[in-house]
Image (spheres, rainbow, N blue to C red):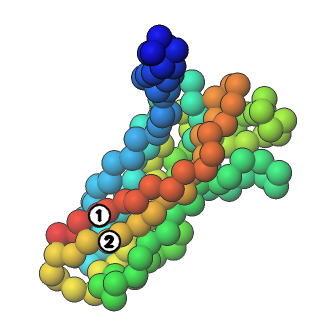
């Protein structure tokens, strides 16, 4: 009985100390540019010490951040998703110059609407984050934009 109690206690402590790391939080916003054009804005808030990589990275580097949007016949994408300035540094983990973002990153996708009615745009962002010691597995997160 004492052995079972010890095993349960150890398992409980291990489970309670396990952390799910989620160093990036995503928020969405829609900004009207004109009567027919809108910017779908994805903002990543990045925990201190972590880096979110740009949409273009050198071969052999980390997984680049990428966006995809589900077509619904109510809009057309105009160009590619644009990103902020970020930092280009010699990355200690990958041993190459890489553009990344820390603290906050803003991505914008312009669309042209085909309707005057309100609708939603579903998107997905695939991204990878690292700190100076390790990288987390690539993560995919759903995004939702309401176009009014």
Q: Relative to the observer, which residue lies in front, 13 or 43?
A: 13
Contact flag, marks 1 and 2 (Cβ < 8 Å): yes
User: Counting residues from the N terminus, which is met first, the one under dot 1 or under dot 2?
Assistant: 2
Numbered marks: total: 2
Q: Can you see residue 20? A: yes
Task: Tell me if residue 55 comes above or below residue 21 in the rendering.
Answer: below
Q: Residues within 10 Å of mark 2 (few under 14, many from 20)?
A: some
Q: Residue at x 48, y 34 (%)?
A: 20
Give the residue number, with chain letter if any, for mark 2. Answer: 121
Question: Looking at the rendered structure, which numbered label has been put on residue 126?
Answer: none
**Residue at 44% across / 47% down in the picture?**
106
Q: On the rendered structure, is 2 left or right of 41?
A: right
Residue 10 is at least partly visible in this image? no
**Residue 48's spot in the image, x, y percent?**
50, 24
Q: Residue furthest front?
A: 1
Q: Secondary structure at mark 2?
A: strand
8 and 146: which is toward the camera = 8
Residue 145, labelled with which disc? 1
Query: What kind of element bears circle 1?
Result: strand
Horizontal and vertical percent position of residue 59: 82, 55
Residue 2 lies left or right of residue 39; in this view the side is: right
Q: Determine the CA span between mark 1 and mark 2.
A: 5 Å
Q: Is residue 142 left or right of residue 101?
A: left
Instruction: Bin the neighbour count of mark 1 within 10 Å (Cα to Cα): few under 14, some 14-19, many 20 and up.
Output: some
């Amino acid at each position: 009985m004492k052995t079972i109690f010890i095993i349960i206690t150890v398992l409980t402590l291990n489970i309670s100390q396990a952390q799910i790391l989620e160093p990036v939080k995503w928020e969405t916003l829609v900004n009207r540019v004109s009567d027919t054009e809108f910017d779908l804005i994805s903002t990543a808030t990045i925990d201190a010490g972590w880096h979110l990589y740009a949409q273009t990275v050198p071969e052999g580097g980390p997984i680049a951040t990428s966006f995809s949007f589900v077509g619904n016949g109510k809009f057309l994408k105009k160009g590619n998703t644009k990103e902020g300035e970020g930092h280009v540094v010699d990355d200690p983990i990958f041993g190459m110059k890489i553009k990344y973002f820390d603290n906050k990153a803003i991505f914008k996708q312009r669309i042209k609407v085909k309707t005057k009615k309100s609708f939603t745009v579903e998107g997905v962002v695939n991204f990878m984050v690292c700190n100076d010691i390790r990288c987390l597995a690539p993560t995919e997160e759903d995004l939702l934009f309401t176009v009014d």
